Image (cartoon, grey):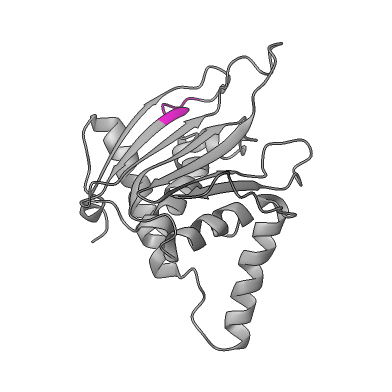
């Protein structure tokens, strides 16, 4: 997800300081994933399969949070035993930034005869601007381009660059492409295995939080 084109625009707006200090950020997924057959043996649905991407995206943008609180419930549609179908995760940062991730794999009875509203939208609110993006995934077709729009203090309207690429399959090609470039140049890849461990720790902190109904310091999982 780090290489989704809209996410990269968000990264640029943050790293350049255009949005100012971040105040509040959200990722809101209303989509129906294709569960993998082996998941039934793990007893886990969303946190380790879908939420991991969104937690990693927040880490990309803002770094590691000080605390995480996650609340879950089973998804009515998913048949194998699980507790983490629909997940709401709050990330607390020591600089007062708050980030909220909603992973809703039910989305209402979209497969049972109800009109659907399928999307993944992210939003970053800063002291000096606002950015809103939509991930090009769970649309028909999967190659639907991602979108982004942003406005800064003093602007009269949103700026909306035209994106031609999507998460599926473009971001995967970029991720693997960057890894091959790193190998060719004998350099560390942009996404390292050691950094991945911190994302996995954040996922496991969310799992523990949901199980024990309390906030968790991710460094208690992996320092």
Q: Residue at x 69, y 63 (%)?
A: 173
Of 221 and 18, nearer the camera is 18
The quarter holding residue 199 reads bottom left
- Picture coordinates of residue 218 (x, y %)? 26, 51
Query: Predominant secondary structure in magenta?
Result: loop
Of 18 and 68, nearer the camera is 18
Q: Residue at x 46, y 52 (%)?
A: 57
Does residue 52 lie above or below 194 as drawn? above
- Picture coordinates of residue 111 (x, y %)? 69, 18
Does residue 135 lie above or below 21 as drawn? above
The magenta-colored residue range is: 81-87
Of 145 and 212, nearer the camera is 145
Residue 96 appears in the picture as rendered: yes
Magenta stretch containing residue 82, yes or no? yes
Horizontally, residue 33 falls left or right of residue 162, namely: left
| Quarter in which the C terminus is drawn | bottom left
Residue 1 appears in the picture as rendered: no
Q: Residue furthest bottom?
A: 185
- Picture coordinates of residue 174 (x, y %)? 65, 65
The quarter holding residue 34 reads top right
Horizontally, residue 169 falls left or right of residue 123, namely: right
Magenta stretch containing residue 217, yes or no? no
């Amino acid at each position: 997800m780090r290489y989704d084109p809209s996410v990269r625009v968000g990264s640029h707006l943050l790293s350049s300081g255009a949005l100012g200090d971040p105040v509040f950020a959200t990722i809101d997924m209303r989509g129906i994933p294709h569960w993998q057959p082996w998941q039934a043996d793990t007893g886990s649905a969303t946190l380790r399969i879908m939420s991991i991407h969104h937690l990693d995206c927040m880490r990309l943008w803002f770094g590691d949070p000080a605390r995480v609180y996650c609340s879950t419930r089973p998804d009515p549609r998913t048949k194998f035993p699980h507790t983490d179908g629909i997940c709401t995760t709050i990330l607390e940062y020591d600089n007062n930034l708050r980030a909220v991730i909603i992973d809703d794999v039910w989305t209402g009875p979209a497969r049972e005869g109800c009109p659907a509203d399928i999307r993944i939208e992210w939003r970053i609110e800063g002291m000096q601007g606002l950015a809103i993006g939509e991930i090009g995934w769970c649309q028909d077709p999967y190659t639907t381009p991602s979108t982004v729009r942003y406005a800064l203090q003093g602007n009269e309207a949103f700026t909306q660059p035209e994106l031609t690429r999507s998460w599926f399959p473009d971001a995967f090609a970029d991720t693997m492409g960057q890894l091959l470039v790193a190998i060719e140049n004998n350099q560390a890849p942009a996404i390292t295995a050691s950094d991945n461990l911190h994302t996995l720790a954040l996922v496991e902190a969310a799992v523990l939080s949901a199980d024990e109904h309390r906030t968790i310091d991710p460094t208690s999982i992996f320092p």
